[in-house]
Structure formats: structure tokens, C-alpha cells
Amino acid sequence: MIRTALSHMKTESLVAGILLVVLLLLPLGASSWLLSDLSIYFSYALFAASLAFVWGHCGLLCLGQAVFFGLGAYAMSLVTLGMVPGVEGMVSTWLGFAAAIAVPALAAQLLGRFLFHAQGLQGAFFGIVTLAVAFIVERLFINWDFVGGLNGLMNVPPIVLGLNGDGYELWEAVPLYYAALFVLVLGFSVLAALMRSRWGLALKAVASHEMRTKSLGYDTAHYKTTAFSIGAAIAGLAGALFVVQFGFVSPSLIGFGLSAEVLIWVALGGRGMLVAACAGAILVRVLESNLSSVFGDTWLLLLGGLFIVSVMFLPRGLVGEAIHGLDRWRAKRRKGGSTPRGKAVERLSPSEYTAR
Amino acid sequence: MSSVATIVLDASNYALILLLIALGLAIIFGLMNVINLAHGEFLMLGAYTVLSIQMAGGPFWLGLIAAPLAVGLFGLVIEEVVIRRVYHRVLDTILATWGLSLLLKQSIVLVFGPGSHSIEDPISASVMIFGAPYPAYRLFIMAISLLVVTATFLFFFKTRIGLAARGVIANRNMAACLGINTRNLDRMTFSLGAALAGLAGAVIAPLISLDPHLGLGYLVPAFLAILVGGLGSIMAPVVGAAGVGVTENLAATFLSPVYAQLIVFITAVLVIRLAPGGLLGKKRRQT
Amino acid sequence: MPGDLLKISGLSRSFGGVQAVAGFDLRIGADELLCIIGPNGCGKTTLFNLISGHLRPSFGSIQFKGAEITGMAPHLVARSGIGRKFQVPSIYEDLSVSENLAVADFAEPGRKGLGGLFTSRTGNDRRLANLIGLIGLEELAGAPAGHLSHGQRQWLEIGMVLATGPDLILLDEPTAGMTRQETERTAQLVQAMNREQGVAVILIEHDMWFVETLKCAVAVMMQGQVIAKGDYDTVRELDMVKEAYLG
Amino acid sequence: MTSITRRKFLGSAAAVAGGIAASSSLSLPALASGGTIKVGAVLPFSGGLELYGNQARLGLDLAVSEINGGGGILGEKIEVLYEDNKTDPKTSVERATSLIRRDEVLALTGPITSNARDAMAPTIKRMKTPLLYATNYEGGACSREVFCFNTVPNQELEKLVPALKKEAGDSFYMFGADYVWPQKMFETAKSLVESEGGTVAGVEFTPWGVKEFAPVIRRIKESGAKVLLFALPGADGITFIKQAEDLGLLEDVTVGFLGFAETYLGAFGEGKAQNMWVAVPFAESLQTPGAQKFVQKIRAQAGSDVPVSHYVMTHYNALMAVKDALEKAGAVDKDALMDSMQGLTISTPTGPAEIGAVDHHVTMNMYLAKTEGAGLSVVEDLGSIVPEAGCS
């Protein structure tokens, strides 16, 4: 019975489920440093998921996604360090999380309205403008002394379970690992649910053919702005999750460098599926931390080469391609042969790429 | 206060350098609709070509000739191996060329090391202009830039291939129908754009310290220049480069380098948003 | 005049000195079926772009159901009840056929809002089932739209437009590139939606055989204006039409 | 080392539980740490400031081979694990964290930039791991864990400013990169200039990555300043000096080059960038027996043409201090190291140096020098200067 239930699950969900079980069991066997590394990579994975949502699902190639990650990290830091003017006494981690979601979402809302309304920016132009925005915001934060300038803010407290910065500090490797995993799963689930809803379908339609969607009566600018904000909110949450572990935030978290990195993770993992993007982020990070000292300078060469190859030949990404292969294999084994009704068709068509 | 003459000289010097860099970028973008994020690294390859020749004991001038040839040839190979496969996916050209830029940067690190290198000044003399000494080499750069821009104009307006290329800008499908070999044109265009980047890199090499990251510092303003100028005409990058270059230089002169960058970036974003076709651009066909 | 569904008066639009649409007047009743014919470049598609809000007119006014819709954004025009099928079949190639229709269905006025966040992707509506039967794609419901043939794409797009529940549909060359058989099928489909669903239709067409089959009223458009209007048989006898269009 | 046994236990528990094979094999490298003392070096080997990273490495390598050649520390060998921080604060923290957690290093050394050091500070503090910082910086990094082996502003500027004033003139212009080190340097410099009766003609900062300095150079020229205090490290600094030379600025002003290393000279080219003044704790051309022997040893190890700047020596000193401190404590652990390093006097190639008992900054000999020909020539032995570390 379980077998039939499993065989009817979407391959993507199945893979996500298996990965989750593995991650849940991992603390039984893994060393604490590996768990600590992974807890941080979970924030990167969530960050990657936010970009996969905005780029893969909604077709908005954002070259400045780190702006929102960074804003979230700064928001969390300012709150927990008691630096928010007027409410210095409020140092609650929970308020920090709320701010880390709200501030980037608001920023994206404003930026989205500016960029998308009326005859909005399309495809490549949107990409280049977000790139320029990343440079601008990084520059602004470097010159903003209140948030510590180039050096940023230090000694950001870890997650404190009490209501206002008192109580148990989440710092031990294993509890922190589960907390980070929980936040990742939470953010992931929100995005996955959105993508499966009708609203998510409409977003995919906007990405696939905007003019058509507009002519069906959709206010596409509004849809894009909202999607952009949701992506930003999740990126901000990831930033907050990052900073409570890293203990510091600086402009290098907000600019082009990290935006470019996350783009590689998502492209290598797979932009079309959340789970592929997350796995891409974790995989690249794990490999980098273990192999970069072995390969030295050739590591970046390898990564760059792999990136080009995957853009040219594997638009689904390495992990995405693997999941897709598994999907086809399962479909074959189920015999029947016909694709089940409503199954998302992952084939990327030219219309997804070309800027209209 | 600096004399007006030196301010004008400095500003036009920077604008002309930017124009030389933006020209190749604009040709590739305008004709092929390829956003080449590796353009900065093509620039760097040009500069390192000069460096290699200097290290082998050759004169700078040989490097100046070799750089566009070498980088042009390299562009031809890249077009065949990478760019050709992503033509119809505009967003993917951004990613592919960006991956390429990573690759090139890292290759240079492996070959020449991550550190800085220096090219010796080929003309160390100064010329007196309005009573102030001005390095002769900077004047030479301005001359080269003007020469190259003029040559490009003549090429596009006075030759048959240039006409064909303009046909492709206007309407790619139509041009293909009329029997223009767009495949060869693409090869030529990309290679030409790369060669221009190589030349620009060679020309600016003596002004700066050479390191594998030098591309980015030029790529971003050059990009803003062509987006601000627009894509519809060959004249557009001239306007864009002048706008971006002069604004940045004047802001640096009268305010500070920190604000100069900010002002240029913010203004450019506003212009791109409010006039998506660029200042000089015709409205692109929405298909 | 009350009772008119669509009333266009004095509509003009020029591109760099060329008048694509020049002082165009037209009235359409609630259940009318009108074919607009005319040579290439006579401003037919520009006319549709003006009505659907993709272009702003230089002069003139468009009233729909008695309300001014001139210069309104495309999605607002669509919401007011004007559906449009583009000349190049515009469907979501990477979505399945039923998802394509679901996207359109969800856009129908009154069904929007955040409720969509919590509903599943494909509604189980009988309406959608009827629609998919009407366009004859029942068996392909789960297939990616990108796999459809040219004719099937056209029908799917018509189905999508219908799913939004419009009062008026603009069809831009719905049979371009179709076989005889497919054209016939399309004619039936257009008639069905006009007669059975009570939707007014304006269509642009080149294929005179199709126009004949539809037995619709015909307007001849030249140089941005309607130069003649009447039923098919009357219009085809006009000298200027023969000369300019039918040859 | 109880922590290792606990991990061993966890590892075997996993095997018993028949857990995930991959994860337990991943955890194995952490166990292979018996018998050597590990020090993690988080340094830039790419990303813009690699020339400093490479200099630091020369000193650390020499210290390792000297210590191990002399029988190690309390019988244990020492090993330095190098990690490239790409001149980036985020990467620095990542590397530092994995060095502490995975490789269980006894101490860290590096990084170069202030923002990377500040970024690492919370990690260092939480994991109670000593940081041996051996780059000149703005001061103020004061905690139980941090030990600074290079200079703070007063050590570099106290004698340099008067010397420049005497040499070139009263009017100073200050130009540097837009971050905290140049800012703090110039603050100190400003008060020194004013107390010496000089004037400050201008203070200016630039973002990283600027390639065209003509407007700034013009402005400095126009200001009529006689001295330029210059704090723009890395490739940008080289670009500035090149353009300043071309535009004739170096004929009008005398440069006081902050954060100078002999490695720059190769990049300026033959006969360029002459008469730039520095105050450093070490110079290649220093004619004392200790200094000359040090240069010889470095070159024997790394090649006869490598430049040997003070960064080589300060990083060497830092590691040698670990040896002295552990031997004094008679134990190998982090607390013993931090305790016995306080107030320790070590012998360095330029004579004895004392680590402050409270502020953890080093009092050492300083030298006034200027660029001449293809190197630095030492003008004056400034004697030892006590650091004003800026600890509150």
C-alpha cells in the first residue's frame, strides 16, 4: 500500500521527502562541524529557493537577489542588537525574524512597482537593472555609518528562544541544526504551496507569455511585483537565518558577489525545481569547503566550466536533470506510459528564455 | 580650481576610453542581441596580451597590434563553441558569458598569478596644454579612440558588409530572407566586438595596474553607457559613453569618487527605466 | 446609441506620419458576428491593438457596453469583457492544455483575489470540461500545449479566450496556416460561440472561403477606414473590393 | 582532548546504528589530528590583496620549518593550515569556522583587512580561539582572544608625520580607500599634523575598483599640498601611483605610503615611485645582523628574488610567539596559550618585542625608510614605540 502511494507521488516531492528524512537522521551519525556547516548551508539553500521561485518559476532573472538576503540579515541584526531607533529595548529574535521578512518584502514591493508598472522592464533589461541596483545598495551600505559601514555589524546574537532576547540561546550544533532545518522546510513549503496554487499557475503563465496573460485580464505587473516581494521575503528570512549563525553582517552580503554566487548554485542545481535549487546550493557549498583546498585555484575554473556547460546543455540544472531522469524512469516503470493529468511539464520551451 | 581645459581634457579622456570599451559591447548587443558579460575579461585578455609580449621582451607597439588580433581570434572560437548555442535565449547569454568571465579570470590567475603587473609607459613625454603638462600617452589614447570610432562608422555606412549588418539590426528575419548569411555575420560581429575589447584593453594597460579583476571596473560603466545610449543606432554608444563618462568624471572632480559612482548608477537606472529604448534608441519591436 | 455593445468613433492612430487607422467608425450589436477584410498593412491588427489597449489611439473614442474604454490598460479592457486571440497562436507551451484553460478561467472577473493562493492548480469545473469539449481537445487535456499541432493551438487559444467569459471576442486571423478541414472546424467553433454562447465576434480574415462559410457580415478596411460594409455576397460584388482585394 | 573522544564515540554510535555511511565517512578527517599542533591561517590568496597573503605565508612557512627543525613545541610538530579568504569577510568567517570546528586548530592567524577581522571576531570569541593578527591596522581590536603583532596608527605615524613635515613641507593631503583603516589612520594623522603645526589641505576617500584617478590627482595638485598621506592598498593603489606619476603629481608632493610592502615596487616598474616614505617595523634592506639573517633564511626557502616586507616578519613573529608561550605554559591548549602570551617578550629579527599584558599589542622597534632605486632604504632607526591600541 505504501508502495502504491509512493509510486503515485510526484518525483520532485518524493526526492524532497527522501532528502528531508536523510537530513533529519543525519545528526545520528555526523560530526558536529558537519552539522554546523550544514546549518549555515540551509540558509543558503533557502536563499537559492527564493531565487528559483523568482527566476525559475516567475521568469524574473534577478541579478541582485542578495540585496534582499542582505536586507534581511541587516534587519535581524539591527533588531537583536537593539539598534532600531525608538525601540532599543526590543531585542527579540522573533521580532527580528518579522523585520527580516517585512523589510525586504517592502523594498521589493517598491522596486517592483517602479520597475514593472505600465510598460515595465522586460527580461534582460530587468536583469541588468537589478545588477545595477545591487551595486548601488552595496555602495549605500558601505557609506552608511549607522550600520557599520564597510565593516558591518558585529556580535549579532544567536537565536534566543525567549520573547525579548532572554532565555535559551540556540548555539549548540544539534539544536541549531534542527532549528535551521525547520526554517528551511518552512520557507520551502510556503514557496512550494504557492507554486502549486492557481495563483502560482498564473505566475507561471506570466513568465511563459506575459502579453497573453495580460489579455486574459491579469494585471501582470501586480503579479510580478507580488512574486518579486515574496521571493524577497524568503531571501530575507534566509538572511536572518544566516546572520544568527554567522554573528556578523557586512555589505559583502548585500551586493553583486553573493548575488552572483546564488545564481551559480541555482543554475547548477536547477532553476525549475525548488528542491533542485536547494540541493544545488548545499552541494556546491559542501564541495567547495571540502575540495577548494585540494583543487586550489582550479576549483573556480571547474565551477565556471560546469556552469557554462549546464547553461548550454542542461537548462534544467544538474540536480534537476537527475530528478527529471528519475521521473521518466518511474513513468516507464508505471507502464501506462501516459503522463498523469495535471503533471507539471518541466520541458523548458524557448518562450521561457526569450525576452519578449 | 583646476583650469577648465584640464577638466575638459580629463573628462573627454575618460569618456573616450569608455567609448572604446562600449563600442564592442554595443556592436555585439545591437547586432546579435547577446549581452556579453565577459566583455570585461576580453578587455583583460587584451591587456595581458601586451603583458606577455612585454615579458618576452617585445615592444609595447607590437602588443597593441597583437592584442586585437589575438582577442578577435579568441572571440571567433568562443562564438563557435559557446555563444552559437544560446543565441535564441537572451537570458542564457547573460549566464553563459558570465560563466565565461569566471573561467577567463581564473585561467589568467593560473597562468599569470593573482597579483598585479605593470606595463611600462610607451610614451613618457608630456605635452604642454594651456600651460599645464599633459601626458602624451593620454592624448594618444584619445586619438586611437576617435580613430576606431570613425573607422567603425565608415565600416557600417560605407561598406557592403556594414550595410548588411545594419539590415540585421533593423530586422533579423527579413535580412535572412534577403539572403544575408547571418551565420557568417554573427561570427564576424562577435569577433569584431572581441577585437575591439582587446584593443581597448591593450590601450589602457599602461594606465592601470593589471590584475585578473580589472574587467569588472570597466564593464559596468560601459554597460550602463550602452543601455543609456540605446541600441537602435550606431551613434547611441557615443552618446551613452559621453553621458556616463562625463557625469562620472565631473562628479569625481567636483564631489568625490564615492558619490560619482552612486550618481552615475542611479541616473543610469532611472534613464533605463524611464526610456527603455535608451536616449537615442528607436522603440524596439515588441514581438 | 444604447444597445450597441461596441461603439468606435473617429479612431485614429499614426506611426511616424503614417496613418494606420484614420477616422475609423464602427458599431457592433450584442450578438453580432463581423468579419473585417482588407489588404495587408491596412491597419487591421493596429485596430485590434487599439481596442484591446495594447496601443493608445491618437484620436477618437471606443465605448464598450456604454462605458469609455479608450486608452485603458490591456488587462482592464480584458476584464471589462473583451477577449482577444492573437495572430500568432499565443498559448503557454510549457503548461498542459487543462492548465492553459485553468489560467484563463481563473482570470474571469469575480474569481480573483487571494483565494487563488489556497486552491489547487486545476479546477474541477464542469465549465472547463464543457469548454475543452467545445474545442475538441478532451483527449489531450494532460498533454503539454507545446506538443499541439498548429490548428489545435489556435483552438486552445480560442478556448482560453472563451474561458474568461467575454461578451466580445476579437479574432486575429484564426485560420492562418490551417488545412481546409481545420478551417471548417474553426468555422463551426466560431459559429457555436456566437450563436450558442451569445458572444459577439469581430474577426480579421484573409481567407475568403472561410468568410463565405461563416456567412457573416463583412466590413472592408482600406487605408485605416471602413470603405464598405454588408453581407458577403454584396461586398464581393463591389468593384473596389474586387480590385483592391480579391483581384 | 575530550572533545575528540566524544566525537569518536558519536562516530562509532553511528556505525552501530547502521546510520548513513556517507556521513560517518565524512566525519573521519576530524579524527586524524594526533601529535601535531595546528594553526589555521585565513589569508587572502586571491581577490585583490593576495600580495599581502603571500607575504604572510612566507613568514609562517619559515617559522614552521624552524620550529619543527628544532624539535617542535613540547615534542609536538606544528602545522599551518592555509585557507584562502578571497579578501572577503564572509569567506573569512566560513574558513575560520571550519578551521576551528573541523580541523580543531589551536589558534588562527590572519586575515589582512579590518572588515574580515571584525567579521571573524564573534566567531573567535564564541569558540574561545586565539587570533594572531599580524597586519598593521587602525587599533581597537581588544579582547582576550586577539593578539596583534603589527603596528597601530601611532606607531606608524608618530615619527613619520614629523619626518615628512621636515622633509617636504607643512601642508598635508590624505587620500585612501573608503574603509575604517584609512579613516582611523587619517584621524590620528590629522591630530599629529595639527599638533606639529602643519595644515591638512584635504582628506578624501575612494571606493574600491576605481580605474581613473585623474580628477583626484588634479584636486591634490590644486590643493598645493606638499605631503600626500596615502592609504589605498592593493591593485588600486598601484593604479593611483602610476597615474599620479604620469600626471606629474609625484614631482609636487612627497608621499607617505601607509601599509607599504616591498612587493609593490616590482609593480611600479623600474625607477618609478621614488622617494615615498614609510615607517615600518622591518625592511628588507635593514643592515642589522638579525634582519639580514632573516632575509637570507626566507630567500633560502622561497627563492632569491622574493621581496621580504615587514608582513613576512610579523607573521613569523606571531608563530614564534606561540612556541615561546606554549613552552612557558608547559601545556598545549587554547587557554594556556592566551594566558602565557600576555606580557610575553619574544625575540624577533629586529630585537626583542613585548606583547602587552593588557592590550595584547606589541611594542617593537620601528624604522623610517623611503623608496630608493629598487628597494626601501632605511633612513633612521626610530627605536621601540609603544602602541596606543585604542582599547577602552
Image: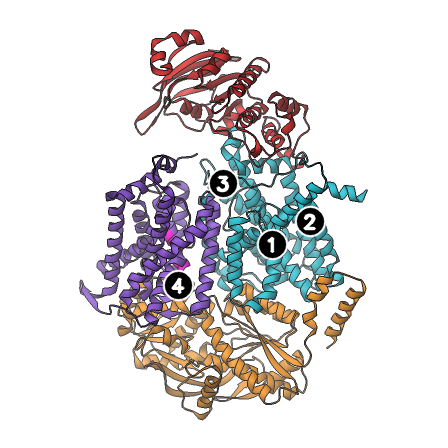
Q: Chain B is drawn in which colour?
A: purple
Most foreground residue, D374 or A297: A297
Which chain did the renderer colour red?
Answer: C
Chain bearing mark 3: A
To which residue does mark 4 refer? D206
Amino acid type of disc 4? Thr
- The image quarter containing residue D72 is bottom right
Chain ID at mark 4:
D
Chain under disc 2: A
Identify the residue position indicated by label 1 in the image: A280
Q: Which of marks 2 and 1 is nearer the N terminus?
A: 2
Which residue carries the number 2 mark? A16
Q: What stretch is highlighted in magenta?
A: B211-222
Residue B9: which quarter of the image? bottom left
Q: Position of residue B4 (x, y in %)?
A: 23, 58
> Label 1 sits on what residue type?
Gly
Asked if labels 3 and 1 share a chain, the reply is yes
Q: Name the residue under label 3.
A: A113
Q: Local crowd at mark 4 within 10 Å, few (<14), some, or many (≥20)?
A: many
